[in-house]
Amino acid sequence: MKPKILIIGACGQIGSELTYKLRDIHGKDAVIASDINYGNLELVNSGLFEILDAQDTTSLKVCIEKYSINTVYLMAAMLSATGEKFPMKAWDLNMSTLFNVLDLAKNGQIKKVFWPSSIAVFGPTTPKTNTPQYTIMEPTTVYGITKQVGERWCEYYHNKYGVDVRSIRYPGIISWKTPPGGGTTDYAVDIYHQALAQNAYECFLSENTALPMMYMDDAINATVQIMEAPAEAIKIRSSYNLAAISFTPKDMVASIKKELPDFSISYKPDFRQAIADSWPSSINDSEARKDWNWEHRFSLDAITQSMLTNLAEKAN
Ligand code: AKB
């Protein structure tokens, strides 16, 4: 099957880079980017783009038919920090878009779905280090609840209706092209922007808060890899644990200081500290490594070098 791809939420942090990567692989005309508004003009102007509210079943169906789409990447979601401010909006957005896409797949209108889950599916009762694939999951954020419930529904649609849906539990993602929005792990991107702008940063998490993180290049490779794997290789149809590295704000400071020795940080934890404290500090992703050969490439120092170089070039 030659993929004809729709990316929902293409203006966002991961959606934008996924759009560029999938166009490189499958050709410009095979990938239609969509979002609820023109949130990222560079992306909008880079190829086929549709304004689309994926909560609206009819609009989604019309777009799928217009372009004969067979593969959907559903990247639109309200993340953990914003979700706590607008709990019902987060629930409605995250769940209704998933059901709309899963139902189109159930009815045979699309053949393959990618839906991202998150480390937010875990909660304070989950084993905190080297968190296994199968374990206690009692998320305490609305975002985490939507991702956990969503995983159950993905597995259900696969088992009951044969829907080819694939998913990974993203850790915090670090990138320079498009900023993240509304997440608890966003500090790990902001810190590089502020390091270049003013050689200082006020961090909203405490210095020893360890969280699982990953560079965007690794996250995009994982996404492409799981979608390209043969269906028989995908043994888990809820969502795969996925890991690269884990670090604290203090570790980041040490890494940045290797490039910018005068960089300084202060700590002012806010409501996001409680969210971070409820999540694992490291993840066991042996199932992904075994089933579809996942391997990460970027270390913290490699991320720091790439972020500082690319952000500095972008600013000039
Ligand atoms: C967030 O912080 O909410 C996201 C995530 C870990 O899913 N980056």
Image: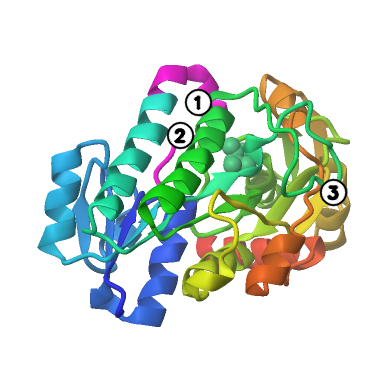
Is 237 left or right of 73, judged from the image as shown? right
Q: Which mark is residue 78?
A: 2
Is 24 left or right of 155, judged from the image as shown? left
Image quadrant of ligand 1?
top right
Q: Earlier in the sequence, mark 1 or mark 3?
A: 1
Q: Which mark is residue 83?
A: 1
Q: Which residues are magenta?
A: 76-89
Q: Which mark is residue 61?
A: none
Residue at coordinates 23% horizontally, 40% vertically from top-left?
Answer: 53
| Location of the N terminus (image quadrant) | bottom left
- Against 190, is 49 above or below? below
Asked if disc 1 and disc 2 are in contact, CB closer than 8 Å, the reply is yes
Q: Looking at numbered disc 2 in the image, what kind of residue is underneath it?
A: Met
Q: Which mark is residue 130?
A: 3
Look at the numbered disc 1 and say if its residue's Cβ is closer than 8 Å to ligand 1.
Answer: yes
229 inside magenta stretch:
no
Nearest the camera: 292 or 176?
292
- Against 70, is 209 above or below? above
Is 138 left or right of 85, judged from the image as shown? right
Q: Looking at numbered disc 1 in the image, what kind of residue is underneath it?
A: Gly
User: Marks 1 and 3, how far apart in space?
Assistant: 26 Å
Image x and y of residue 116, in percent? 50, 50
Nearest the camera: 44 or 31?
31
Asked if disc 1 and disc 3 are in contact, CB closer than 8 Å, the reply is no
Q: Is residue 186 visible?
A: no
